[in-house]
Image (spheres, grey):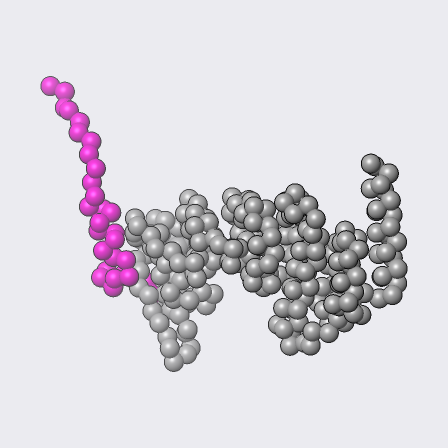
Amino acid sequence: MTDSVFEGKNQLPRSNSEKFYLDSNLADVKFVFNAGTDHVEYIQAHKMILSIGSSVFANMFYGSSTKQDDVPIDDVSAVAFKEFLQFFYLTTLRLTSKHIADVINLCKKYKLVGVLAICEAALRKSLTIDNMFSVYAIAIHYELTNTIFFCEMQMVQNAEAILESTNFLTCKRDLIDHVTQLVTPELEMKLKVGSAWVIVNAYMAWAKAECGRNNLEKTTANLRAQLGQSFANIPFVELSSMRFEQFLTNYNGFLSESDVRRLRQQRRLRQQRKRERF
């Protein structure tokens, strides 16, 4: 008689592992936070469960002659580490935007396979105009290609709001040129007239914010110094005559006399080429 085979779902292993999350029962490793201080915190876990999900943990606990029972953690907070440990124990995860960068860092550090997609989904879900550049910077730093593309699409679709957002003022200097160049075509298409003025104002607002971060007076000399090489990318040539003169009034001394002469000449040549095309 041929034996019949029945296949069914068994929820017991899953439910058992969830019981052990942050539980000291049978725990055989402690992660130590704030070691050497008066506020030491411990998170207990289970070597075998961690080793199944991470080759780094497997090597740490079973691959060397020195067995680690206390593991100091000094690059993230205990709260972020608890969120990270969810990947080993839980089927339903709760990731907060506050700690998502640290969780991604830990996932990469301990080589968790297949979980970055979950982190990226959490990042994209948290994305707003007000945190766009924070999320974008995280995506670039950790080479999260899908999230980089998603952020850039959102920037293009919300170009004017992005440049006028408070979050733009906090982004790193190496991002401002990339972002303004990214959104310029969309601005030109939507605004037709005045897109260059929006971009110029965005650069200047960023320079003012950077002066504030560096405890500098917002003098025209300091504003220009904060912009550094980005100064060359500010689209003064594309401003209307009225806007260009308005800028010179608003930021007297920001442009040198030679800058003004050069820009006026470039503007005349640009207008002439426009007329010749039509």
The residue most toward the top is: 1
Left or right of residue 94: residue 203: right
**Which of the two residues, 100 or 152, is positioned nearer the viewer here?**
152
Q: Position of residue 213 (x, y in %)?
A: 62, 72
- Magenta span: helix, strand or loop, mainly? loop
Quadrant location of the C terminus? top right
Q: Quadrant of residue 99?
A: bottom left
Task: Tell me if residue 213 comes above or below residue 151 in the rendering.
Answer: below
Left or right of residue 22: residue 192: right
Q: Position of residue 32 (x, y in %)?
A: 38, 69
As for residue 23 lying within the magenta part, the answer is: yes
The residue most toward the bottom is: 38
Q: Quadrant of residue 277?
A: top right
Task: Tell me if residue 180 comes above or below residue 215 in the rendering.
Answer: above
Q: Position of residue 146 (x, y in %)?
A: 51, 44
* Residue visible at 63% across and 73% down in the picture: 212
Can residue 117 be seen at all in this image of the molecule?
Answer: yes
The residue most toward the front is: 242
* Residue visible at 54% across and 47% down in the picture: 154
Stretch in magenta: 1-30
* Residue visible at 79% across and 53% down in the picture: 237
Q: Position of residue 83 (x, y in %)?
A: 37, 58
